[in-house]
């Protein structure tokens, strides 16, 4: 397909999470002007690559001296002889299928039904500062008297640094020498807030002590009336008719929940560091891919055409494919937006192809089509083949192990 990078097998289309719906959509929006004649030679013919071949080709010196010399692969186009040999071999493994159509019928069309997937992963580190408070219970603090407060990007987090291109990781680190003691704003340093039960009618921030409430048992009489007409002293209020506030004990204040009654808060700066991968993906397909059966794409193995890693990736270069150069440029142009509070660590750009070729053969007004899938050149021919002599008995014979 091109001369950039090595060719390695990648997961099947289902494992790579490229849905058939995406393929159909990409094929519907494809333009034939994207595909020059050199690309319409259909299948990218190449022997099955060695899985141990180095897959990464680095564009820059980020992270050390990677890349270097790498094996190249040359795009080979299937000719008529190879197509017939593949079909004859496929037919030869089928009971009662004749090879005459494969040998003699005219090859009417060889159509490229490839699907291309381009990705750009941007690995970023984002940092922000938040304030953390807790009740101050006394003791020494790590304040500015212990040293200058570090800025957020001065923190050394090498021990926390994750593997490149992890989906997401977050850590929290206290910024040294950032602790201060502040007066609690919720209670203005008193350690308690005004009781709303007995001081609800007071001005904001003001309260009165020893506010009593009416006894709920005797309704303020101090006596409990009985059916025989007698009265007894109310034991709940001891005959006073009033009782202390049940919420605050008539102190006028209740314990402040913010400072836990201390009146002071310990405030520090906390750094939140997030490493994450921002991903951009683009799927493109030839118009012929729209009519390919779903099962063909699920059988096909994707092949990685390039995989580059750099601080900032640039479009890949394929010496023999204007389309792939343009496709790579479009993927790079759709780079995800990096937040203002983040910095880019590095990027990774890959282009893969799901190679599928449709061959149509014809003879005297009759025709049939089959597919050649992947670099292994598997032939897919499910339904119609013009030379069958078993009258549909082959599946039965196979089931009976005859």
Image (cartoon, grey):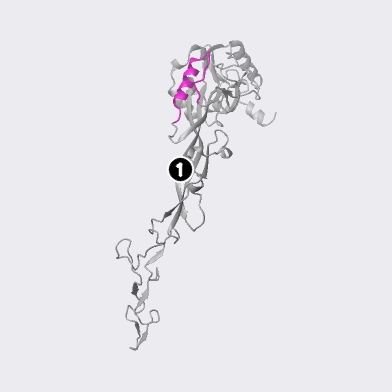
Q: Does residue 276 show up magenta in the picture?
A: no
Displayed quadrant of residue 257? bottom left
User: Going by the image, does 391 lie left or right of 246?
Assistant: right
**Relative depth, front residue between 338 and 385:** 338
Q: Is residue 124 visible?
A: yes
Displayed quadrant of residue 3? top right
Badge 1 is on which residue?
129
Helix, strand or loop at mark 1: strand
User: Going by the image, does 296 lie left or right of 266?
Assistant: right
Q: Does residue 314 show up magenta in the picture?
A: yes
Q: Is residue 258 visible?
A: no
Q: Position of residue 296 (x, y in %)?
A: 55, 25
**Relative depth, front residue between 383 and 155:** 155
User: Going by the image, does 157 lie left or right of 25?
Assistant: right
User: Magenta stretch?
Assistant: 312-336
Q: Please rate how many residues cluster around mark 1, counting C-alpha atoms within 10 Å: few if below 14, some from 14 to 19, many from 20.
A: some
Q: Position of residue 216 (x, y in %)?
A: 35, 75
Residue sitting farthest toward the right = 402
Q: Position of residue 92 (x, y in %)?
A: 66, 19
From what the image shows, is residue 279 above or below residue 327?
below
Residue name at image x 55 percent, y 28 percent: 13
User: Going by the image, does 240 lie left or right of 155?
Assistant: left
Image quadrant in which the C terminus is located: top right
Residue name at image x 34 percent, y 82 percent: 222
- The number of numbered badges drawn on the structure is 1
Image quadrant in which the N terminus is located: top right
**Relative depth, front residue between 153 and 56:** 153
Q: Position of residue 262 (x, y in %)?
A: 45, 60
**Relative depth, front residue between 86 and 210:** 210
């Amino acid at each position: 397909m091109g001369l950039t990078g090595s060719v390695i097998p990648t997961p099947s289309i289902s494992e790579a999470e490229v849905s058939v719906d995406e393929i159909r959509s990409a094929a519907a929006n494809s333009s034939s002007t994207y595909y020059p004649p050199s690309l319409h030679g259909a299948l990218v013919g190449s022997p099955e690559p060695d899985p141990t071949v180095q897959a990464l080709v680095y564009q820059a010196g980020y992270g050390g001296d990677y890349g270097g010399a790498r094996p190249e692969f040359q795009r080979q186009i299937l000719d008529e002889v190879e197509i017939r040999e593949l079909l004859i071999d496929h037919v030869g493994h089928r009971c009662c299928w004749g090879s005459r159509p494969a040998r003699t019928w005219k090859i009417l069309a060889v159509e490229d039904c490839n699907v291309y997937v381009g990705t750009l992963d941007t690995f970023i580190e984002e940092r922000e500062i938040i304030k953390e408070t807790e009740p101050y219970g006394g003791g020494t603090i790590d304040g500015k008297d212990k040293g200058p407060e570090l800025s957020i990007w001065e923190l050394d987090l090498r021990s926390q640094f994750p593997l490149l291109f992890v989906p997401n990781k977050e850590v929290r680190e206290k910024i040294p020498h950032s602790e201060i003691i502040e007066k609690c704003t919720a209670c203005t340093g008193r350690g308690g807030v005004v009781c709303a039960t007995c001081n609800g009618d007071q001005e904001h921030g003001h309260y009165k002590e020893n506010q009593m409430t009416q006894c709920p048992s005797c309704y303020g009489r101090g006596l409990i009336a009985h059916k025989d007409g007698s009265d007894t002293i109310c034991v709940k209020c001891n005959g006073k008719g009033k009782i202390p506030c049940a919420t605050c004990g008539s102190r006028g204040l209740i314990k402040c929940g913010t400072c836990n009654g201390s009146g002071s808060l310990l405030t520090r700066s906390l750094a939140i560091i997030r490493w994450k991968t921002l991903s951009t993906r683009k799927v493109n397909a030839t118009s012929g891919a729209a009519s390919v059966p779903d099962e063909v794409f699920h059988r096909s193995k994707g092949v990685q055409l390039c995989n580059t890693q750099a601080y900032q990736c640039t479009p890949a270069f394929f010496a023999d494919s204007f389309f792939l150069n343009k496709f790579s440029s479009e993927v790079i142009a759709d780079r995800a937006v990096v937040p203002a509070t983040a910095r880019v660590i590095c990027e990774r750009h890959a282009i893969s192809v799901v190679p599928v070729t449709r061959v149509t053969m014809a003879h005297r007004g009759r025709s049939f089509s089959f597919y050649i899938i992947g670099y292994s050149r598997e032939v897919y021919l499910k339904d119609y083949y013009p030379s069958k002599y078993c009258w549909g008995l082959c599946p039965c014979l196979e089931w009976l192990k005859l």
